[in-house]
Amino acid sequence: MLIRRLKYWMESARRSETLREEMELHLAEKAAELEADGMAPERARDEARRRFGNVGLKHEESREIWITRFWSELRQDVRYGYRTMIANKAFSALAVLSLALGIGANTAVYSFIESILLRSLPVADPESLVVLNWHSPPPFNADKQWVHVMHRVQGLAWPGGKGTMVSGMFPYGAFETLREENEENPVFSTLFGYFDGLKHNLAIRGQATRASVEYVTGGYFRGLGVLPAAGRLIDSEDDRPGAAPVAVISFATSQSRFGGASNAIGKSILVDNVPFTVIGVAPPQFFGVDPAASPDLYLPVHTNLLVDGPSAASMYHDGNYYWLEMMGRLRPGVSMARAQAVLAPRFHQWVATTATTSGELAKLPALKLNPGAAGLGSLRRRYSKPLFVLLIMVGLILALACANIANLLLARAAARRREMAVRLSLGAGRFRVVRQLLTESVMLASLGGALGVLFAIWGMRSLTLLLSHGQPNFTLHAELNWNVLGVTAALSVVCGLLFGLVPAIQSTRPDVMPALKNGREGGPRRRSQHVLVVAQIAISFLLLVGAGLFVRTLNKLDSINLGYAREHILLFSLNARQAGHHAPEITTFYTDLLKRFESIPGVSSATVSQSSIIHANRAGETYRGPIKIGTATVLGAGVMVVGPHFLTTMQIPLIAGRGIDGRDQPGSTPVAVISERMARTYFGNENPVGRRITFVDDKRDLQIVGVSANLRYGGLKHESSMTVFVAFSQFTPDGATYALRTAGDPLRYVRSVHEIVRKADSRIPVTDVVTQAAEIDRTISQELAFAKLSTGFALLALLIACVGLYGTMSYSVARQVREIGIRMALGAQRGAVVWMVLRRVLLLAAAGLAIGVPAALIASRLVKSFLFETQPNDPGTLALACIVLLSAAILAGYAPARRASRIDPVAALRQE
Amino acid sequence: MGRKAQKNDSLPGSLDMLILRTLSLRNLHGYGIVQFIQQSSGNELLVEEGSLYPALQRLELNGWIDGVWGVTSNNRRARIYKITAAGRKQLAVETRKYAKLTLAIARVMEAE
């Protein structure tokens, strides 16, 4: 039907002719018949026509059968609109370009939102997956002590609302209990678990790299409904203690390391020196259940006993150790609410048995099921708010662009008033004329949208770069798909209607007579222009304030005194334990390496620690138990394991005693260096050197040998906390991060580093190679991105608003030529004329600010969490934004004002 | 703007049925159809001539009739319409509907 209609429509001209001929024939035959009955030829023809009815109308009605009138009129309008656009090249280009920028920016940001918030996991029937979480009351009691059944955790807990704690981590016992419950009372077809195994050493045919590992239970792949690209996937049989160690590798790994999925099957690999057999390859698009991760390797949960050593066995029996995450696939016909109703009471019952005190019993976690179609929410939690703020910013830009075009259209409508008046007086329906004008604006918007897609592609790339800020494992990838393009198309049409409607309605107001008489004033039109300009000024003020706040935040962050050196330091990490080194040999291995790094020409000093200072509070196993000085318990201190020369390499001043150095050996007295704040807090004005500090869980007494200056431990935004430095040789961690102080660009020494490590042990990959400066900047990548983007947006907004203001003022000056001429003829000075125009500009700007300032005060609260040491209502920022805006307004208004003052009174008066 | 085709038939849709019935007997051009209906109804049914052409377009769009250029009985070039197989089916449907309707009306009229 549709195709036939389309064919008819394409042949419409020919068919229209055919129809006309048919009707002519009909009339001729009728006339002939009447004539045969004895009527005069002339009368016969008239009679035939009379009986037939209105030929033109019937023709039209017949045509309407195959082309509805709408389409033919649309074609007319489009053709007419095209001509108008060509005739006003400058206007059209400006409009299309500003729209393209606006729509492109919106499309780019939306594509990110779509990729995080709206896309499902690439598995079978994602809608029936649910994630298991728990919520619990705030874990601290009135004395700020931890009172919660979760004694140890490996993974994340995040705040719910009102101080509550939310997490997806469970003890293994909870998994077993829920699995039993599900067998008795089946709500899931599969309940499966997994946890992030972090990075491990993966050696394939003697070549070692770091690979991210996901530990999965036997039901994982079955529950997700994933089919292997080659071989088979992990099954329940593979996931028990003592089973043959098997591994599933990601498709990408099979390609890069084996040259194809099928080549990998049956091959032996070493994970931290433990042999595994590859049994299968995951499908290409599969990335596990967390869109933020992309594991290279999937291992059965119980193989962590082999990889992480027998100490991991405690994880399975400790009901207070939270580490396993869970998902379930609902059986057909079972709702999430029903599954929740079945499982939550059982979990409650179980978790109550793990409480060791009544305080813990009062704060038990409660099971809560959440939809799992989109996988885990880590990306959502991290990026949805920043992207939401970005979307608001680009939305404002688009609104500005629309307002601007509406403004230009209003000005142009004045020029087209006669045209419209003529059309209306010739009998065109008002609706018809409005429709034609709207077609024109939607055409402009569609062109803008098409061009905007190009901007969007570019914008998505730069946004990815900005947000990732060089993080190698950045997993947030946006793409243009039909969903995004559909939204772009819809946005274009809506924009076209939005900026076209007011001008279209205004230019077709019924009072056409004054226009025909070439009347000049158009009160309502001027009013709408002013409203638009005021709105533009208010919007650009909002964006200016946003930019000001973000730049100020960045400045604050940049001016933070870290307490340690930022430049000329190269950082890189190794993990010798994962390559098969064990205590006590591992300590010698690390220390020998350090000596070799120190001897690289150009390296003035080198040191080693368990992690970089920035990542210190996120790094793996350091001492986390209670610390005592005498009888006082130390609260909120970070323990950092460091080698010799750490303080000098990092340029942390030594205040008393000595730093950790070569004298501190595995067998000698354990020593500690504490930071100044800690010394002040626990020793007052006494000298702490020579006193003792106790690591209770390790049953070790350390002798304090020195006091260092304060430093920001574990990130820029953290307060300068209390720090305890202990000797690397006495507390050797599994992995080590080396720091080299270099002459010139630190990255020049990377090659030598690789060389030395390869000679020492080729099984150990060097990872996380980065300069200290870059590592610090990474932690503020979001602030950097926001400062750059918002500044760009604010400048763009200011530019658009100025163009709008300039256009409006130029137009109003042009209309007032006569009035100004008269004033000047009566003796008005040029300065007075300039002031007359500028005063109007300032009035408009003031009106814009009157709306913008309160709006900014409200809106800036939204970005409060993005600011650092900056209040959302920062008066300096507000004042600066006001000044910038007023200056820009005066600048935009000055040209029309000057033009007004140059009006020749004689010429102006003669004009009419 | 917004003018709709008017149908002056006493029974809506009956014009389509009459045209299909006519064309099921012989192939005719527009004016021929008008004449045939008029004559075979004993001049009782006068087709509003103007409505004929929209109706023909509609029937052709639905694929029930097919028009080709040909020559009329008095040797003039005209579009001659033919009924298609789908058209015959449609005619059967409409005839049945019409029979039901007239029967129903007759029952009402005869009810006591």
Image: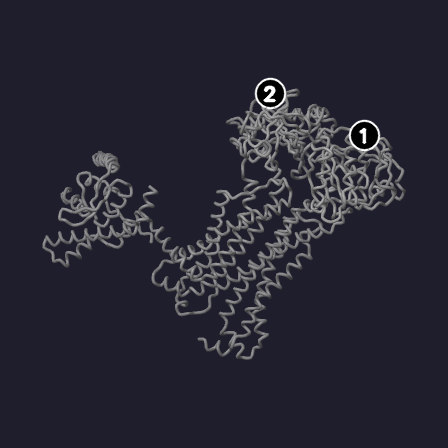
Residue matched to label 1:
A698
Q: Which residue is drawn at 79% across and 29% down?
A: A584
Residue A906, placed above or below residue A321: below
Residue A56's x, y, as percent?
A: 26, 55
Residue contact between numbered discs 2 and 1, judged by CB atoms under 8 Å: no
Q: Pinpoint the chain carrying mark 2.
A: A
Type of the residue with mark 1: Asp
Quadrant hosting residue B11: top left
Regarding residue A334, the answer to whether it shows in the image is yes
Residue matched to label 2:
A237
What is the spatial separation of the Cα atoms under label 2 and label 1, in whole angstroms? 38 Å
Regarding residue A342, the answer to whether it shows in the image is no
Residue A900, placed above or below residue A738: below
Q: Pinpoint the chain carrying mark 1.
A: A
Residue A516's x, y, as percent?
A: 39, 68
Q: How crowded is mark 2: few (under 14 residues within 10 Å), some or many (20 or more)?
A: few
Q: Nearer the viewer, mark 2 or mark 1?
A: 2
